[in-house]
Amino acid sequence: MNLEYYPIRGRGALGDKFQLARIKDETGNMFKGQFDQAMHFSSEAELKTYLAGVLSVAEGELSIAKMDL
């Protein structure tokens, strides 16, 4: 599964984390309401682990990349 994500940077007490604003797969599914937009992440690896759990896919089957807006 290929996902694109849009991060909101500057989160957390030190401003070193990011939130997930939206995600989209290759078919255009935005997964609205299926992920916690208030959650903060320290790295893309942490985000990938979280999304694999939310979407019930193996981490190795998931590819993520930042959206090019």
Image (tube, grey):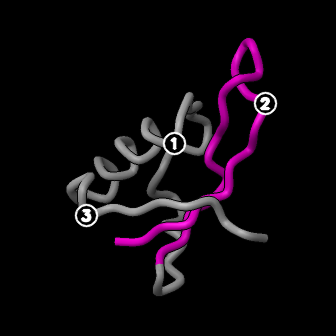
- Determine if the magenta segment contains residue 11: yes
Split into 4 quadrants, where in the image is the C terminus? bottom right
Mark 1 residue type: Glu
Q: Nearer the viewer, residue 33 or 17?
A: 17
Q: Amino acid at mark 2?
A: Gly
Quarter where residue 9 is shown? top right
Q: Quadrant of residue 23?
A: bottom right
Q: Which mark is residue 8?
A: none
Residue 21 in percent (x, y) is at 67, 52
* Contact between labelled residues 1 and 3, with CB atoms less than 8 Å apart: no
Classified by dominant secondary structure, the portion drawn in magenta counts as: strand
Which residue position holds label 3?
61
N-term mark: 1 or 2: 2
Q: Which residue is mark 1?
A: 44
Element under disc 3: helix
Q: Residues within 10 Å of mark 2 (few under 14, many from 20)?
A: few
Q: Residue at x 51, y 42 (%)?
A: 44
Q: CA distance from mark 3 to mark 1?
A: 15 Å
Residues rendered magenta in the picture? 1-25
Residue extending farthest to the bottom is: 27
